[in-house]
Image (spheres, helix red, strand yellow):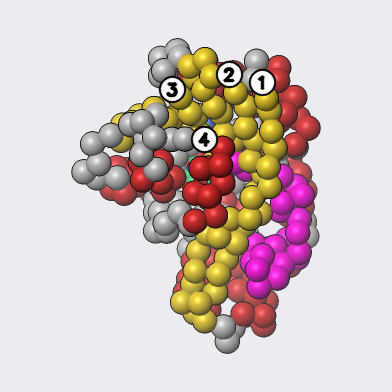
Amino acid sequence: MPINFNAEENRHTYVGRDVQQDWFDLIQKLVDPGDKEIADIGCGGGIYSLAWVKMGAKKVTCVDSSQQMLADTAENTAGIPNIIIKQGDALCTGLPNNSQDIVFERALIHHISPENRTACFAEAHRLLRSGGVYILQDKTMQDVQLPGSPENIRGYILDVYPHLHHFEMQRRPNNIEVSHGLKTVGFKQIKTISLLEKCTTYKDFSQLATDFQLRKGRSIMHELSNEEITHLINHIKKFLGSKTDIVEKDFWTVWIGIK
Ligand SMILES: C[S@@+](CC[C@H](N)C(=O)[O-])C[C@H]1O[C@@H](n2cnc3c(N)ncnc32)[C@H](O)[C@@H]1O
């Protein structure tokens, strides 16, 4: 069953880790966030909203459709004055026209049905000032079907449960369609970049197993029963069971468009 972002038991799914240097390095090559107004749409627990503040943003508006996720954002960003939290839909945020320098959407569009994605891109375009930058980060089919390995732990999920290819096919954005959609709504200088982003370091295998059991940070795990997750953990244990300081990296595609 797809993840329910509004369910209380799914709170804390997108918190508990810090953004790593790979992501900062890429973003700093693309934009200068200093003194900019930024909307982080589909912000989850606000992990990346905080990263934008760290990079010197003037104001970060955290938008999410889920009150539960925004409760995490509020906890995670407590006391930071230039963070604004707003419940809203990515297709219709309620933020003013031409109010943002950067609109950022990470791991959002695979949760938006393909027929609504153009409306999502159009909303980002409406929010941006002229010259503003839209940054979309998500996983394509190419990113998710890379085989499992100690460097690509997520890959083990499809290795063990190949039927999930179909689930991913239905929701994963296609590079050509996204680039075309961005162009259709008026973005210029559209670029696509691959990113290998370090996300989590587990001190040992038991920490990794606990994260998997809690289905943390991976909505695809909500397609699996508890028994299937236990079987998956046992499979991964064969490769990583005796390791310490296990570094998990994720393959992403990043699209950039200028208004
Ligand atoms: C996979 S999480 C990503 C969280 C965060 N961006 C990150 O990368 O850590 C997706 C987030 O998008 C939110 N979301 C899903 N559909 C949305 C929509 N139509 N409008 C706004 N937020 C949405 C969910 O509530 C969830 O917090």
SS assignment at label 3: strand
Mark pair 3, 2: CA separation: 11 Å
Contact between marks 1 and 2 (CB within 8 A): the answer is: yes
| Quarter of the image where the C terminus is located | top right
Q: Which residue is mark 3?
A: 100
Mark pair 4, 3: CA separation: 13 Å
* Boundaries of the magenta span: 137-159
Mark pair 4, 2: CA separation: 14 Å
Q: Is residue 95 visible?
A: yes
Contact between marks 4 and 3 (CB within 8 A): the answer is: no
Image position of 161 (left or right of 60): right
Q: Is residue 226 visible?
A: no
Image point (62%, 80%), residue name: 240
Q: Which mark is residue 259?
A: 2
Which one is earlier in the sequence, the residue at label 3 or at label 1? 3
Which one is earlier in the sequence, the residue at label 3 or at label 2? 3
